[in-house]
Amino acid sequence: MNNRVYITDNSKTTILIRLMVGAVFLSEGIQKFLFADTLGAGRFAKIGLPLPDFLGSFVGSFEIVCGTMVLTGLMIRLASIPLIVIMLVAIATTKAEILVDKGFWEMMHGSRTDWAMLLGSVFLLIKGSGSWSLDKLLMKNEK
């Protein structure tokens, strides 16, 4: 395997960002299936996205898989890319209307979790998974 996929540093604190990002995405992905009418396909239909049944399952599956990868620190750079895309789409499709209708501060208030997940995912893309991760274990085993 190409070690650039899982190369990381010795940071022991990156796990805090991984726990936050991974737990939120894993939880949200599971909820898209448990509460499809309000958080999955139903929500996607309400905001006007095409093929809401497909997209609800598609996005939920990515959130579960990538959230688990982030929690374990496995190929975190690859896992963070779909999560960044998910958050950019979420902000564009759900927060633009709030910005237009209610203003900047209401939009910022409503998007605080979105921004935290976006920036946490970008951090992990740049930084890697840190010391306590499967990526670090794979690096050690390859040497």
Image (cartoon, rainbow, N blue to C red):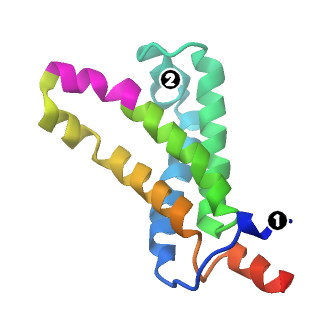
The residue that appears at 42% across and 49% down in the rendered structure is 118
Q: Secondary structure at mark 2?
A: helix
Height in image: 76 above or below 115? below
Residue 1, x across and y down, in percent: 86, 65
Toward the viewer: 34 or 133? 133
User: Where in the figure is residue 49, as x and y percent of width and height?
Assistant: 50, 16
Q: How many marks?
A: 2
Report which residue position mark 2 lands on: 37
Measure how far apart labels 1 and 2 are at the Cα level: 41 Å
Magenta segment, principal secondary structure? Answer: helix
Amino acid type, label 1:
Asn
Instruction: Identify whether 23 is placed above or below 110.
Output: below
Question: 29 left or right of 105?
Answer: right
Above/below status of 17 relative to 37: below
Magenta residues, as a range?
92-101
Q: Is residue 95 magenta?
A: yes
Give the number of the mark in front: 1 or 2. 1
User: Mark 2: few, some, or many residues within 10 Å (few <14, many ≥20)?
Assistant: some
Residue tagged 1? 2
Q: Amino acid at mark 2?
A: Asp
Query: In terms of secondary structure, where does tag 1 sit?
Result: loop
Q: Quadrant of residue 88?
A: top left
Q: Circle 1: is it few (<14), some (14-19), or many (20+) Cα within 10 Å?
A: few
Residue for point 60% across, 37% down: 60
Disc number for residue 102:
none
| First in residue order: circle 1 vs circle 2 | 1
Instruction: Pinpoint residue 108: horizontal percent, then vertical percent.
Output: 21, 41
Percent x, y for residue 8?
Answer: 63, 75
